[in-house]
Image (cartoon, grey):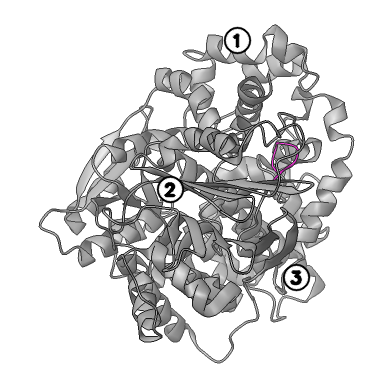
């Protein structure tokens, strides 16, 4: 887990007086937190190419310095992430005649490129973002892992291409403009994250997950293509029992290979199904003398904000050690500006705050941590899937189409699952308030749109082109080969919602020099779940139905029986009116915020006095204004 950076092509555009190395030094300084164990760079002797690297040593700590070369120095790579099947790949490459100098996963990338070319990424099981310069071919090859666990940002100008693990590195070197992207800004206000490859910085783009790119020595992008995507074509040849067995095997292997580490390793443990599964499997495979260290966060204020009881159950039955942190409103006030700085862009949901604090706790004990991120998107765990599908079942019953193959359940069979929606009545009232039985895309847009309750906070000009945002949403929603509503929802979340959560996962861990691994997002698990018919994986509208069956004998019964998991809720609505009242007002109602042309002062004042439980109206505005203060002012 590291920080990568690079500049390709003549500088130009007002940067002629500075060298690639000088700009690169500024980039690496901005990425120092990602790699506290070392810094390296390399400049081509024949082309305007510079590669840089900040290292967090995990595999072969003594020999893994980067950028790393092949035997004759004609291939150089700067790599962030972990190739979990590096042992197996390395053995295959040695049998093909490749000679290794280290025992790192980084060197596997170098030789895999020599052997397979651009198809090398198709052989990797892991999380990765890397850039590889081939001196003989005169090309830079860039790639990002299939699900987008590791970040890759770039800024392209005529004759110049620059990339980095974080946007702040591009900004620090003067390679990215300090100006907001109006289109991405609208997407943030609507979804609390951009939904395309745009970022909130004009001119900075992200390489999408599952994509690879080729850049020439003049900084020109020669190709940018997707090498992997999910297919939702249903597998009708196998039954439920087969899928349960297959999923159980993949879960075990995904966790087992992610335990490969030459430094101390632990795990996040919330007490929910996902993290509990990871912890129980990890401890089962733990061959060390010490118990697996696990890390949990909670808030004072009752059971709605404290799940440590369940985390203790898992830790006790698995034989793991549990550490807990309880941050309060003062911690929030003290750390939020720094969180916005490390995030580069406004954060997707208040969960970033406790996640940052839990990562800090974990970093005091281990260097690598496993987590349960991705389980809701892969196994259909969100309540919104049940909300959306309830309407689909009702529509199918009325139109007498409920027996078609694309339906995951009928109105009659979904009824036993409906008590899970008791705490989501406000969502139901809003969802059915308008547009009932409209298109699937427009209905899911209504579920995902977070701007309806917050439009009074912003200038009307911000929503002038709101139709374009809806069009981009619909285009993404309909972009897969899925036919069922459930699979279309899952596909959109994997493309948009999950990358925003992984953005948080990456920044909150790397802020503390901590490598975070997410076994449930093993691409083999994702591919399996995508092809399982909706009638099996979402049987009777039960969230995580198939996953629950696969882990029945893995996690404690008390965890399996839970129906009250709510993510990582933060009691912000309580703090806004008391401990944080002055802080929030000082940020949102000062003269700079009022003059920005983004916010409506009266709307902000009203929102501060009326934020509902678990609401995100004030949160979204607060993060956006802190971002403007940090990066634009």
Find disc 3 in the rendering and name its residue.
396
Q: Please indicate, yes or no, whether residue 347 appears anywhere in the rendered image.
A: no
Magenta: main secondary structure: loop
**Residue 200 visible, this angle:** yes
Q: In the rendered image of this protein, does residue 327 appear above or below residue 197?
A: above
Give the distance between the C-alpha atoms of the residues marked 1 and 2, in whole angstroms. 36 Å
Residue 324 image-quadrant placement: top left
Residue in the picture at 61% in, 53% down: 384
* Circle nearer the N terminus (3, 2): 2
Q: Nearer the viewer, residue 110 or 295?
A: 110
Residue sitting at x 70%, y 60%: 216
Q: Percent from the top left, x then y, of residue 140?
A: 62, 60
Please say if 119 is above or below 621: below
Residue corresponding to mark 1: 586
Q: Quadrant of residue 107?
A: bottom left
- The percent coordinates of residue 417 (x first, y second) are 53, 61
What residue is shown with label 2? Answer: 2
Mark 2 nearby-residue class (10 Å; few <14, some 14–19, many ≥20): many
The local crowd at label 3, few if under 14, some if 14 to 19, many if 20 or more residues have their Cα within 10 Å, is: some
Q: Are marks 1 and 3 in contact (CB under 8 Å)?
A: no
Question: Would residue 93 appear left or right of 540 to someone viewing this image?
Answer: left
Please name the residue shown 41% across and 17% down the image.
Answer: 330
Frontmost of labels 1 and 3 is: 1
Q: Earlier in the sequence, mark 1 or mark 3?
A: 3
Which span is picked out in magenta? Answer: 199-204
Q: Is residue 200 magenta?
A: yes
Q: Residue 166: x percent and y percent? A: 56, 41
Is residue 326 on the magenta stretch?
no
Q: Which mark is residue 504?
A: none
Assign a secondary structure to mark 2. Answer: strand
Task: In the rendered view, tell whether residue 248 sits above or below residue 600.
Answer: below
């Amino acid at each position: 887990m590291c920080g990568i950076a690079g500049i390709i092509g003549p500088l130009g555009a007002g940067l002629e007086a500075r060298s690639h190395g000088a700009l690169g030094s500024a980039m690496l300084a901005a990425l120092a937190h990602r790699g506290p164990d070392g810094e390296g760079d390399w400049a081509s002797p024949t082309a305007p190419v510079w590669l840089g690297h900040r290292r967090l040593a995990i595999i072969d700590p003594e020999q893994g310095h980067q950028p790393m070369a092949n035997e004759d120095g004609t291939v150089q790579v700067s790599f962030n992430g972990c190739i979990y099947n590096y042992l197996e790949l390395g053995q295959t490459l040695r049998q093909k005649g490749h000679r290794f100098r280290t025992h790192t996963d980084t060197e596997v990338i170098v030789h895999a490129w020599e052997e397979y070319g651009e198809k090398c990424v198709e052989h990797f099981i892991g999380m990765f973002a890397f850039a590889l310069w081939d001196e003989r071919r005169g090309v830079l090859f860039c790639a990002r892992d299939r699900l987008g666990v590791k970040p890759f940002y770039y800024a392209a100008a005529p004759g110049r291409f620059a990339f980095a693990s974080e946007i702040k590195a591009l900004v620090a070197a003067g390679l990215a403009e300090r100006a907001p992207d109006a289109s991405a800004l609208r997407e943030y206000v609507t979804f609390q994250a951009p939904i395309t490859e745009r970022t909130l910085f004009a001119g900075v783009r992200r390489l999408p997950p599952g994509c690879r790119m080729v850049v020439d020595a003049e900084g020109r992008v020669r190709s940018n293509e997707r090498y992997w995507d999910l297919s939702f074509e249903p597998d009708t040849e196998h039954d439920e029992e087969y899928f349960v067995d297959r999923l159980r095997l993949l879960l075990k292997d995904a966790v087992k290979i992610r335990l490969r580490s030459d430094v101390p390793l632990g795990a996040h443990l919330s007490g929910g199904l996902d993290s509990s599964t990871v912890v129980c499997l990890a401890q089962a495979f733990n061959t060390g003398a010490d118990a697996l260290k696990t890390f949990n966060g909670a808030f004072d204020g009752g059971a709605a904000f404290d799940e440590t009881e369940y985390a203790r159950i898992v830790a006790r039955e698995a034989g793991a050690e549990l550490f807990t942190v309880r941050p309060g409103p003062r911690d929030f006030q003290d750390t939020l500006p720094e969180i916005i700085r490390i995030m580069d862009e406004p954060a997707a949901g208040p969960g970033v705050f406790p996640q940052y604090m839990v990562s800090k706790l974990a970093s005091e004990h281990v260097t690598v941590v496993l987590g349960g991120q991705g389980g809701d998107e892969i196994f259909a765990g969100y309540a919104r899937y049940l909300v959306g599908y309830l309407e689909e079942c009702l529509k199918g019953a009325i139109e007498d189409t409920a027996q078609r193959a694309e339906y995951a359940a009928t109105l009659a069979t979904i009824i036993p699952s409906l008590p899970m929606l008791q705490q989501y009545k406000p969502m139901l009232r809003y969802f059915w308030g308008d547009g009932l039985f409209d298109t699937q895309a427009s209905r899911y847009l209504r579920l995902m749109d977070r701007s309806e309750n917050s439009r009074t906070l912003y200038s009307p000009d911000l929503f002038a082109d709101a139709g374009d945002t809806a069009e981009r949403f619909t285009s993404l929603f309909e972009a897969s080969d899925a036919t069922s509503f459930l699979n279309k929802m899952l596909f959109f979340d994997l493309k948009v919602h999950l990358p925003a959560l992984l953005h948080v996962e990456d920044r909150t861990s790397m802020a503390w020099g901590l490598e975070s691994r997410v076994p449930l997002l093993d691409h083999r698990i994702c591919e399996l779940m995508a092809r399982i018919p909706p009638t099996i994986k979402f049987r009777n509208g039960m969230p995580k139905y198939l996953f629950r069956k696969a882990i029945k004998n893995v996690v404690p019964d008390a965890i399996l029986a839970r129906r009250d998991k709510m993510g990582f809720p933060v009691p912000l609505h309580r703090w806004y009116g008391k401990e944080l009242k002055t802080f929030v007002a000082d940020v949102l109602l000062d003269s700079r915020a009022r003059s920005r042309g983004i916010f409506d002062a009266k709307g902000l004042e009203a929102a501060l006095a009326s934020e509902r439980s678990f609401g995100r109206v004030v949160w979204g505005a607060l993060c956006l204004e802190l971002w403007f203060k940090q990066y634009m002012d």
